[in-house]
Image: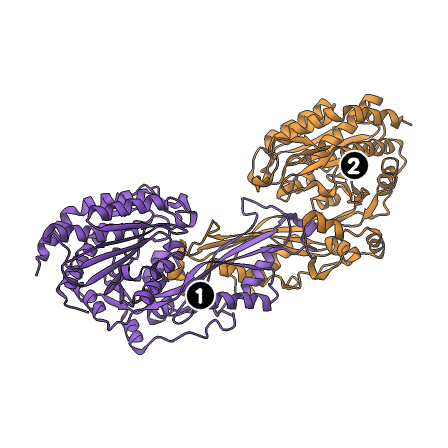
Chain colours: A orange, B purple
Amino acid sequence: MTDTNKLDQYLEQNLHTSIEELKTFVAQPSVSAKKHGQPECARLVADALEKRGFQVTVHPTEGAPIISAVRRGKSARTLLFYDHYDVQPAEPLDLWETPPFEPTLRDGKLFGRGVSDNKGDIANRLLAIDAILADQGELPCTVKFLIEGEEEVSSTNLEAFVDSHRQELAADACIWEFGSVDFQDVPVQYLGLRGICYVELEVETAAMDVHSGLGGTIFPNAAWRLVWALASLKNEEEEVLIKGFYDDVIPPSEEDLLYLKALPDTADEYRTRYGVKKFLGDMQGGMDLNFSEAHKASCTICGLNSGYQGQGSKTVLPAKASAKIDFRLIPDQKPEKVLKLLRKHLDSHGFEDVKVTYLGGGSPSKTNAGDPFVQLVVNTAKDIYGMPMQIVPMSGGSGPNFIVQEALQVPIVSLGIGYPGSAAHSPNENIRLNDYLRSAKHLVRVLNAMGEGTAH
Amino acid sequence: MTDTNKLDQYLEQNLHTSIEELKTFVAQPSVSAKKHGQPECARLVADALEKRGFQVTVHPTEGAPIISAVRRGKSARTLLFYDHYDVQPAEPLDLWETPPFEPTLRDGKLFGRGVSDNKGDIANRLLAIDAILADQGELPCTVKFLIEGEEEVSSTNLEAFVDSHRQELAADACIWEFGSVDFQDVPVQYLGLRGICYVELEVETAAMDVHSGLGGTIFPNAAWRLVWALASLKNEEEEVLIKGFYDDVIPPSEEDLLYLKALPDTADEYRTRYGVKKFLGDMQGGMDLNFSEAHKASCTICGLNSGYQGQGSKTVLPAKASAKIDFRLIPDQKPEKVLKLLRKHLDSHGFEDVKVTYLGGGSPSKTNAGDPFVQLVVNTAKDIYGMPMQIVPMSGGSGPNFIVQEALQVPIVSLGIGYPGSAAHSPNENIRLNDYLRSAKHLVRVLNAMGEGTAH
């Protein structure tokens, strides 16, 4: 048995030092979509792990380096952390109150791109490890890290890496990058992630833009071609019209539906936080919203680009148009299949001229709520939050869990520093210091429990 | 009778001086869509007119200044020139071989934004006037100028100005801003312009962009709303689906159809020049293309803007989306009516959330081919081009002709320096010096004929 009071005290006293370390991570931009600063950020994180006595390897890939690290612990059991050091682009920059890569503390929050997703969690893991090492001089179980730099661009090089390093990464359980309390401050355990298939559609109808007075009624218009192609993909009832898209969908289990029903109503929270006036399909909230958020497959336009977008009017017929599209997939839809069905759909609807570029993707994944490690993590939360974690069978987001789950056959849980106002992927991304502290406290308990062999 | 040889000689000898004057106009940016540099450019043009003994007034408006100018001539007859000193935005800048506002001569061409549309024509009129004044010491007829600075943004302030200055602008005939030879070097007389109704459609579904993993299946997506609204406006057969849109259309006259049939086939030229692989509706060229280019109403997407448009992928649900739309109208469609029908269409199709902003427009206009002034201009071309001008009953473009025609009740013809490769509204806009010279030669003949009272 360890003295958790002493550990908690250490965490409180060293919170500031840990935040300073996090700031150095955030101040180093690492925008994977722009291939900006990833190797430099990988080096920072690798150094931080080495400082804690980890044996660290920075593996070059065709994209950004992947970091693996291990430090042996007292018990034979192994816990693997998966995180990523890359971040989303910071645009639109003018909406940030303080510059995205100059992390700033105000009102008990730290602002900056990546403070929540996911650099904050990396720093938080290190703080928990520091506390245990300070107290016990060694780790209660073996701890491994797998930290990549392309999570925000669909983890292009992770699968090949994990497949060829199964032995090195082998573990009994895995803690995934994110985790958060919900809007009522209840800690939440996300047990699944939707898959994703991210594509760019491009149309080019001429060698140059043409005066719309000349071309409007005689030349094909790239923007119109794109609009019609997009409109053929999904109707106003939000049904994806690609033949076969829903064929492999497995409905949620009865157990999952019970967990879903137990979740709080997020409707008011979403209305206030995001300024959304209505939900899709006239959903009012409750179970409808919880179900739809994560247990439905989606086709989302993430961006549209064609012709003149400046101030005022320009009478031009665009030669080029493009759209970024994000399909979210639920078990057992696969991105490779969706990609094929999409191409087939476009061809059979007369859109052979619409080029499809696959920008990345991954399968959905899911850990069963009944797994002993899930129960360990869920129950150690009680000590800090006054309640066990609330189980959410699936999250609406995506990530490369499926790669680790398929290769290492481990239960995957989430535990982290987030909260619903963190604005991940948006301007003014932030974390609350109090969440940061509680997450570290939870982590030291999970690590100690792993060492005691009380589960799994 | 005047000695046209002497006039031609003057024009040839002073071509370079005139091009230098044009360069000063082009070097002064005057992008109306960006409200950039218009007053400065108006001043330059006004000074140039004063130098030629014109009585010039620069009238302030709520937008850019409007220039009116008059110089009395020998006969009682009056010729009015309509031109504009504003230009289209120069973007995309990286496609220009030399900077748009640094006019550059190469290969017998002058490159720069506005060299063709329409600053080149202004300088060209001045060269013709210089030649006549040098030869005769006075103008053969009274010459007036009406030069505005908002033609590229739908001439917002022209109508009120013309309506309240009818006396001052009164004329027997009007020469409109542009004119050109066609791709076979045949001088062309455009006798009509389509109307235009330019709008921006905007959708806003939330207060901020949201992570697509969270919002994709529960929040409305501004980009999807826009795509569906757009798709409801026009089908893939190019039929505008707005109820009542075609109600006021008057089919072309038999005479117009005969002129259309006499026009050359532009198909190969368009394929080569614009890199268009196919024409709309599988048109092959000839009469089909000539008819469709100007005698059909259009609905053109000029621009699309939503969400992430950068490199790679960003998983975001856009809160905002917008499109710029250009309707081209044929007699007797009116932009005010189209605007109302559009709003009604969106409302009745469930798109009350799509905001419509009118960015400007105007009615179609048309001068009859049989008018004596038309015949004067068409026939004086023979001396320079070896053939009379080819009559095109309507041009696909738009302009505020209707304002002048309705207020002043004058025939309106076009005469200018353009050619099909001029890339008006596009990068690398240019004119050929030879066209410039021929246009000035044609102009001096028209001015002299006006003085001799041989027509109208």
Question: Disc 1 vs disc 2: which is toward the camera?
Answer: 1
Q: Quadrant of the C terminus of chain A?
A: top right
Give coordinates of residue B13: x percent, y percent.
Answer: 13, 47
Residue at (49%, 54%) from the top-left corner? A321
Kind of residue at badge 1: Pro
Give coordinates of residue B125: x percent, y percent.
Answer: 22, 53
Location of mark 2 (residue): A171
Q: Which chain carries label 1?
A: B
Residue A95 can be seen in this image: yes
Kind of residue at badge 2: Ala
Q: Quadrant of the N terminus of chain A?
A: top right
Q: In which quarter of the image is residue A16?
A: top right
Q: What element carries label 1?
A: helix
Location of mark 1 (residue): B335
> In the displayed structure, would residue B433 be above or below residue A47?
below
Give whichever of A203, A264 is nearer the camera: A264
Q: Mark 2 lies on which chain?
A: A
Give coordinates of residue A146: x percent, y percent.
Answer: 71, 35
Residue B278 can be seen in this image: no
**Quick check: A449 left or right of A145?**
right
Give whichever of B73, B248 is nearer the camera: B73
**Quick check: B423 left or right of A57?**
left
Give coordinates of residue A326: x percent, y percent.
Answer: 62, 52
Q: What element carries label 2?
A: loop
Give whichever of A401, A231 is nearer the camera: A231
Distance between mark 1 and mark 2 Cα atoms: 69 Å
